[in-house]
Image (tube, rainbow, N blue to C red):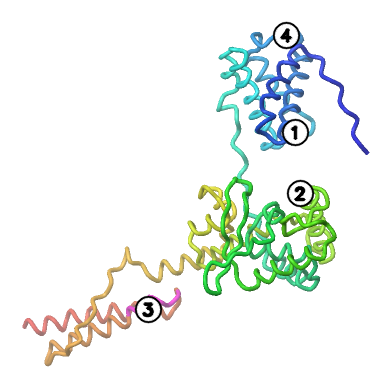
């Protein structure tokens, strides 16, 4: 059912804000334009109810008009999320900046300040658990249909679902002998990249190309057929994942983007360096990549034990004993030093346990024995 169209807002400043929004219409998407119009409508409705005497831009002040609108947003019965609140402030500030330039009212720029924006909530990484990941991949392989192969490709490449919907039929590129990569087109950050893939991912692309060849829709150069729009295709894929999770008894709140989080965490644990992971994900800042990485307690324990097993900054490296064996008391000292060196190297690779503590005591005893032996040489 189509929604009834809202009646035009009856406010003296409505035409002025409409012109400001129209100035953005060339460079922005329809959804963003609707967001700007909704923000302007929300602000002017509040202004008309709370301060009906304000009829011109020159009458607007930070206190009480702008700050009053901010308080109105935060006092709703169903409070806005922090992200939605920030988006409202950004949209109104952009409109005021446009009006300050077009209406030659510089004071409009200072109505919304930087300190008005709350800190956005930190998004925690949401990779799939090991059990969820295994169950979903097994089910996708078992079904071997269009949706299953799409989500397997997302899982093994770290692509966004929107990027996968835009893949071209020739996205699979050869980068060398038995080496392949998928060309990911312009995505969310207006960047394109090449993602190296293995033989299994290549097979997934070939399966999707086969499904495309069977689709009755005319060829348009894309790997995935669209009956209407990209948004409709993405919605169908999301519904497919929802149905699979329901069938497996998993949480139906699992979203496709969690496959991207899982891929990023898996790559980092496999030894991929942080700069390379940024390139694989198509990120432009390290802070953005850190949001995708799940550092579990097991990872912390592993890195901690590795650092303690090789404390280069705490314990000096033992000197390598001379390869030439000397005679007499000098040879005895060389043999003791060699034994101490071998014992220390073996002790460092052990975890913290009773054996490591015992070897530590033995090493200390060898140090005392070497010291006493050197006294015999001097005497």
As rendered, which of 57 and 16 lies closer to the eye? 16
The numbered disc on residue 79 is: 1
The mark lying in front, picked from 4 and 3, is 4
Q: Residue at x 27, y 69 (%)?
A: 316
Given residues 346 and 222, the one toward you in this image is: 222
Range of residues picked out in magenta: 344-351
Separation (CA) of disc 4 from disc 1: 29 Å
Mark 4 or 1 closer to N-term? 4
Q: Check the image and report above or below for 322 versus 237.
A: below
- Residue that label 2 marks: 230
Q: Quadrant of residue 101?
A: top right
The residue most toward the left is 379
- Dot 2 or dot 1: first in sequence order is 1
- Tell me the residue at 50%/68% (across/down): 302
Rendered image: mark on residue 55:
4
Circle 3 SS class: helix
Given this view, does label 4 or label 1 mark the residue nearer the observer? 4
Occupied quadrant, residue 69: top right
Q: Taken as a whole, is the magenta stretch helix, strand or loop?
A: helix
Q: Looking at the picture, how far across and down is residue 164, in whole percent?
A: 69, 56
Element carrying mark 1: loop
Quadrant where the C terminus sits is bottom left
Nearer the observer: mark 2 or 1; the answer is: 2
The reply, left or right, for residue 378 in relation to residue 298 is left
Instruction: Give the Cα separation between the discs numbered 3 and 1.
Output: 59 Å
The quarter of the image holding the N terminus is top right
Which residue in the structure is indicated by mark 3?
347
Distance (Cα) linking label 2 and label 1: 31 Å
């Amino acid at each position: 059912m189509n929604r009834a169209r809202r009646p035009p807002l009856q406010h003296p400043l409505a035409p002025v804000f409409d012109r400001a929004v129209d100035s953005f219409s060339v460079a922005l998407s329809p959804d963003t334009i609707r967001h700007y119009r909704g923000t302007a409508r929300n602000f002017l409705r509040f202004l008309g109810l709370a301060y009906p005497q304000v009829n011109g831009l020159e009458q607007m002040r930070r206190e009480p008009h702008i700050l009053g609108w901010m308080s109105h947003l935060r006092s709703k019965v169903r409070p806005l999320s922090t992200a939605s609140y920030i988006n409202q402030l950004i949209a109104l500030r952009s409109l005021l900046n446009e009006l300050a330039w077009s209406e030659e009212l510089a004071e409009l720029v200072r109505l919304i300040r930087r300190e008005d924006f709350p800190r956005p909530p930190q998004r925690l990484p949401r990779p799939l658990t090991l059990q969820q990941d295994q169950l979903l991949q097994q089910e996708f392989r078992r079904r071997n249909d269009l949706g299953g192969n799409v989500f397997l490709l997302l899982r093994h490449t770290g692509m966004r679902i929107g990027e996968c919907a835009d893949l071209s039929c020739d996205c699979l590129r050869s980068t060398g002998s038995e080496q392949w990569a998928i060309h990911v087109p312009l995505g969310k950050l207006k960047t394109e990249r090449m993602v190296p893939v293995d033989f299994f991912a290549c097979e997934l692309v070939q399966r999707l190309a086969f499904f495309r060849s069977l689709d009755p829709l005319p060829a348009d150069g894309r790997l995935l057929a669209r009956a209407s729009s990209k948004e409709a295709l993405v919605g169908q894929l999301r519904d497919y994942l929802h149905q699979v999770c329901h069938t497996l008894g998993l949480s139906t709140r699992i979203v496709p983007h969690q496959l991207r989080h899982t891929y990023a965490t898996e790559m980092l644990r496999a030894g991929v360096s942080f700069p390379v992971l940024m390139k694989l994900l198509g990120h432009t800042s390290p802070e953005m990549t850190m949001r995708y990485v799940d550092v579990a307690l097991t990872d912390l324990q592993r890195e901690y034990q590795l650092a303690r097993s090789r404390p280069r900054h705490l314990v000096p490296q033992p000197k390598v004993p001379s390869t030439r064996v000397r005679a007499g008391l000098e040879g005895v000292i060389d043999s003791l030093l060699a034994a101490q060196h071998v014992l220390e190297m073996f002790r460092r690779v052990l975890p913290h346990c009773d054996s490591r503590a015992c070897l530590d005591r033995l090493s200390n005893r060898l140090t005392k024995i070497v010291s006493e032996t050197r006294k015999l040489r001097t005497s």
